[in-house]
Image (spheres, grey):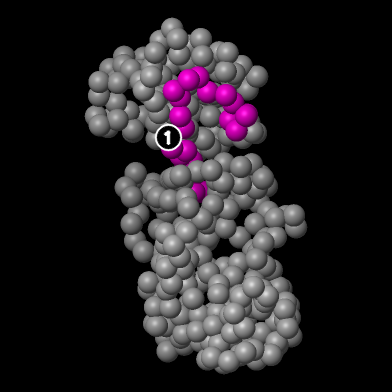
Amino acid sequence: MRDIPVFLVTGFLEGGKTTFVKEIFNDPEFAEGENITLIVCESGIEEYEQDFLNKNNIDIVHINKKEDLTYSFLNQYNEEHKPSKVVLEYNGMWQYDVIENLHMPQGWEIAQVITPIDASTFESYMNNMKSLLIEQFKDSDLIIFNRCKDDTNKLKFRNSVKAINARANMIFELENGEIDDRPLELPFDINSKVIEFKDYDFGAWYLDSLESPAKYEGKSIKMKGIASINPNYPKNIFAFGRNAMTCCEDDISFLGILCQTNKPFKFKDKEWIEVEGVLHKKFIDYEQRDIPFLVVTDYRSIDKIEDELVYF
């Protein structure tokens, strides 16, 4: 039996899910010659017209209660209709564990998780429904911020996502539907003699350096953070970074990079220091990617900064 790819489209009501699904159905490479099943778990302003469904050979199934999204239902449907592709438009107000605990029919495999979201309401959702957003973002392969304006803070949105799911790809779509491919502006000057930034911008630098370590190769930097000493490291190697909170106190984690000094260091584990050094990229075999690595030229002990956490 050949695999049947399932494309999971999640997000809040009026976030652009239906518009996105229509766009991919209009792509001949996706829809042509396929027997597609569209499972819709909520109804918004944008609807699927019958002519559109007929034209693209789409069979639509409506599921209005999460209790009805079961293996038994899907398996019976699979045996009767034998789809070659499945698009599941999921209700963003349902807990994601419904999907995580759902046993799929034989051959059904989630191929991609896509989350469209209205950029104009994103910050409101982050402030008021953060736990639901985190559930949607944590397994997303692609997050589409639609209805962006020229002044949309793309860097802030990107950092919020990357703190939850570092592997997620993002697209920023303007109000006219065009892709906004302008580069993100960083809150510091990467071309200055020594890169420095406000304490609260550590997260922006950290995530950007993880995503694009090559552009920091050979750059000098000065920053404040916590030294983390691992007895298994060589005597001149330590980790340096900050604690970050993505949702609540239970989600605090350490964001750090490895550092090397030319002689054994004298500070203690978890001590606050200010480091100066030169950034390089280092290839990690088991992750098959480059990461930033700091060769320390100077450091000094400092008092803990006023707001020690990084927030996203």
Front residue (pair 145, 199): 199
Q: In this view, does 5 lie to the left or right of 33?
A: right
Label 1 sits on a secondary structure element that is strand
**Residue 145: % across, % down:** 45, 48
Say if 268 sits above or below 203 in the image.
below
The residue segment tinted magenta is 98-120
Q: Tell me where residue 178 appears, x and y as whole percent.
A: 32, 47
Residue 154 or residue 28, whichever sits in front: 28
Q: Quadrant of residue 236?
A: bottom right
- Badge 1 density bin: few <14, some 14–19, many ≥20, Cα 10 Å: few
Identity, as a three-letter code, of the amino acid under mark 1: Ala
Image spot of residue 165 (x, y percent): 54, 52
Residue ID at (70%, 60%): 252
User: Which residue is depicted at the point 51% across and 48% down?
Assistant: 120
List the residue tagged with mark 1: 111
Answer whether residue 64 is visible to the viewer in this image. Answer: no
Is 24 one of the magenta-colored residues? no
Q: In which quarter of the image is residue 251?
A: bottom right
What residue appears at the point 37 percent right and 73 percent down from the top-left corner? 215
Q: Which residue lies furthest to the top in this view?
A: 80
Q: In which quarter of the image is residue 78?
A: top left
Q: Quadrant of the C terminus?
A: bottom right
